Amino acid sequence: RAHVEAIEALNPRLNALLTVTAEHAMEAAKGSDAKRARGEAGPLEGIPLAIKDLFCTEGVQTTAASKILEGFIPPYESTVTSKLKRDGAVFLGKANLDEFAMGSSNLTSAYGGVLNPWSRRNDPDARLVPGGSSGGSAAAVAARMALGATGTDTGGSIRQPAAFCGIAGIKPTYGRCSRFGIVAFASSLDQAGPFARTVEDCAILLRSMAGHDPKDSTSADKPVPDFAKACTRSVKGLRIGVPKEYRLDGTPPEIEKLWRQGLDWLREAGAEIVEISLPHTQYALPTYYIVAPAEASSNLARYDGVRFGLRVAEKTSDLRDLYERTREAGFGQEVRRRIMIGTYVLSAGYYDAYYLKAQKVRALIARDFREAWSQVDAIVTPATPSAAFAEGENSDDPIKMYLNDVFTVTANLAGLPGLAVPAGLDPQGLPLGLQVIGRPFDEETVFAVGAAIE
Ligand code: GLN
């Protein structure tokens, strides 16, 4: 009830949730009470969560924050959300996001941006973005509208909004969570993961979300460890890598300071700090912005006005006309930009020069990490190059917006787990986060290091 009241009070201003399922949630909570009374409580019994509106939820509208999916009510449930329900979680509603998860500000949502619940000390009226694409999920958790939330991360969409909103969030190893029933953006990069106020809560949620699923051929058949237990592990003797290529010109001093501070805490806890090199880092952003749009252009071809959601030109006898007018009315500017870029880099004349080249560079980026794992057990970097920015800042120039992902896209390209941990405040009193990257399927070390920083 407290969370439902917080939603009623705050959501009109924050716009974090696109669909509120409060009645449903209260009913489900009663069911949870009954289960608890019978001694049948699941590990998440009665825990109220917000679900990014990219996860298909049976009988509840799922929009991907796009006009093209308006009115789409999935007849089935995503694997991740069914696992959460199985364990007793209660869903409060569907969280706002950047349209089809494309963005770093939540401003590309067709249903309006989300306001970050934090504000600048010296300019409290500036409307700060929550980050993106999972901005609604992060804002909902930060504003105490939900205890936790689901997100997806293709290039940083869990870690960047977690950092901007002062909470924890993890993108697990590619394959750790099933992608079945999650609206696809870039299938070789997309991963689901949780947001919560603490690292341990993320660990608890991830344990429920993870696991093999025959319905997703890329989901890994690996046992799911007790991640929460890993949060209490000592970091003594661990080798923590600091990649020199992540020291970028123009990084604000507060980010440098945060990074040093985090490393000091780990050193004091007995970890060894090791400088490492990931030589292909500078190519990660351009590689990402070729691979992600290429896959997106293919995935988004299914929105044709026939199968899902919006249909324009109902009465036309020309199928092509129906496709074109539906897609023109249904897709926003950023989505169109991605489709254009993706189609271009996959086209016959440019495939070798762009897409194939990007795939090769992606392999080199993954190799850099593989080599690093012989020297270190985890890598610590800033999560973002700045604190939350205001609406209007960065939005005039898509390249500036893409630079937000400079520290996060590498983990997606290499398929590695990455955790964002709240680690301090900037001079304006805004939260800043550090990122912990780990070996494939070694979320346990990532959680141990994250909990030590937190
Ligand atoms: N900001 C990145 C993009 O716009 C990442 C988004 C994501 O992780 N879904 O593609």
Image: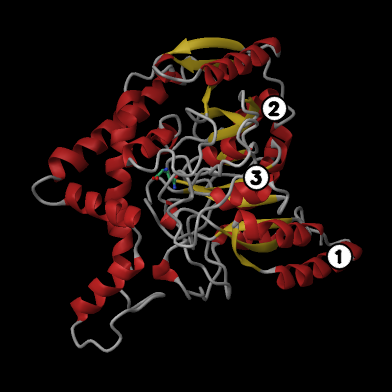
Q: CA distance from mark 2 to mark 3?
A: 21 Å
Residue at the location (67% across, 69% down)?
21
Q: Secondary structure at mark 2?
A: loop
Nearer the viewer's eye, disc 1 or disc 2?
2
Residue receiving disc 1? 33
30 is higher (above) or lower (below) than 47: below
What secondary structure is found at the residue carrying circle 1?
A: helix
* Label 2 crowd bin: few (<14), some (14–19), many (20+), radius 10 Å: some
> Mark number for residue 454?
2
User: Does any atom of ligand 1 lie closer than 8 Å to the CB of label 2?
Assistant: no
Q: CA distance from mark 3 to mark 1?
A: 31 Å
Confirm if mark 3 falls within 8 A of ligand 1: no
Which residue is farthest left?
Answer: 349
Mark 3: amino acid: Pro
Q: Position of residue 369 (x, y in %)?
A: 41, 25
Query: Could you tell me how far apart the alpha carbons at marks 1 and 2 are, in whole angstroms?
Result: 32 Å
Does the residue at mark 2 contact the one at mark 3 (Cβ under 8 Å)? no
Nearer to the camera, 91 or 416? 91
Does the image show residue 229? yes
What kind of residue is marked 1? Answer: Asp
Can residue 211 be seen by looking at this rendering?
Answer: no
The residue shown at (23%, 49%) is 341
Judge the density around disc 1: few (<14), some (14-19), many (≥20) Cα neighbours within 10 Å: some
Ligand 1 resides in the quarter of the picture at top left
Nearer to the camera, 212 or 172: 172
Residue named by callout 3: 117
